[in-house]
Amino acid sequence: MFYLDTLSTLVAATLVLLLGRKMVHTIPLLKKYTIPEPVAGGLLIALALLVLKKSVGWEFEFDMSLKDPLMLAFFATIGLNANLSSLRAGGKVVGIFLVVVVGLLVMQNAIGIGMASLLGLDPLMGLLAGSITLSGGHGTGAAWSKLFTERYGFQNATEVAMACATFGLVLGGLIGGPVARYLVKHSSTPNGTPEDSIDPTAFEKPAVGRMITSMVMIETIAMIAICLTVGKFAGQLIQGTSFELPTFVCVLFVGVILSNTLSLLGFYRVFERAVSVLGNVSLSLFLAMALMSLKLWELASLALPMLAILTVQTIFMALYAIFVTYRLMGKNYDAAVLAAGHCGFGLGATPTAIANMQAITERFGPSHMAFLVVPMVGAFFIDIVNALVIKMYLMLPIFG
């Protein structure tokens, strides 16, 4: 047994990220499906540790004391970057898309629990292979798996969550393009839309505004620290009540309240790019730690049943995007691009959704509505709504 302390684990996590970056930039398959660097590097290290354990009996233990704070910091940045005033720009479209997303969350969990029951598995396994990891991604999966392990005694929950989230990430990027191309051909504008004079969004063509200075970073770190402190306190206050929510949701809520209150008062404007930088750093380090410490040998007995559930979920996502998302969003070019984005974060994560939409808009023309709606719903509202849907399912008698 080899033990790595806090600093050694942090060094290992940064090396995993550098390894992942090299892999993504040199292996065409990883680049094509926009596999995140921490996922690529982390899974490779997890596989290497599996080989070492099985061949020579070596096992590595990591100090994970930084993992939870990094996860909470990531969710704090999502809240801090949620500008509620931008809802007016999306208007009715955001509301309709949010209803479509909620419908998918409900169905993903129903399918997951149903399949788990048919296969004789713990229904918690169905939830982990449902909206927790598919619509929630690695960060949400890790947060809920920790709760499942501590409260419900579901061993290997983190390993299952990371495997499901990674599977979804790959498939979300794989099916988004074909689904959107099929829908574009059957839309009211089969040749796409021409270039227009509307200013592109930050996601379409990221523009640099204010400079990131040391003072800006200190201010941003202070706001993240406030979110973590107040969020943890709020989580403890509602613990054991009917309003109980995971700590990361409380932290996210505090971030939303803090950033929008400061904006409303005109006291301070949150620097979105600085928040995003720190959020990406936190998420990358957190994912690297979570994935490099996976004990893959503990997943062997769950591999086939988990693959069966996720295969059904992938087929359902494609059908849902075609017959529900596309139709309810207007059956036009924007709806086709939105459907591609929904495949991205419905199975993987918001970055996958953005990559899916960019692949379509580069070929057929811009879709400003899609790039306004998907990041807003996929990076913010999805986490709050998903938490409420999961909590609703956990109230069912099968979960005791």
Image (cartoon, rainbow, N blue to C red):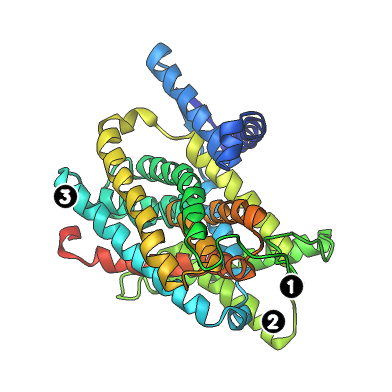
Q: 202 above or below 84?
A: above
Amino acid found under the numbered disc labelled 3: Ser
- SS label for mark 2: helix
Residue 80 percent coordinates (x, y) = 62, 69
Q: Are marks 3 and 1 in contact (CB under 8 Å)?
A: no
Q: Are marks 3 and 2 in contact (CB under 8 Å)?
A: no
> Toward which corner of the image does residue 157 lie, by quadrant?
top left
The residue mark sitting in front, 1 or 2, is: 1
**Residue bearing mark 3:** 117
**Cα distance in 3D space between marks 3 and 1:** 50 Å
From this view, report whether residue 49 is shown above or below residue 285. Answer: above
* Residue at the image position 35 percent from the left and 27 percent from the top: 297
Distance (Cα) linking label 3 and label 2: 48 Å
Disc 2 crowd rating (10 Å Cα; few below 14, some 14-19, many 20+) is: some
Location of the C terminus by quadrant is bottom left
Report the mark closest to the observer, 3 or 1. 1
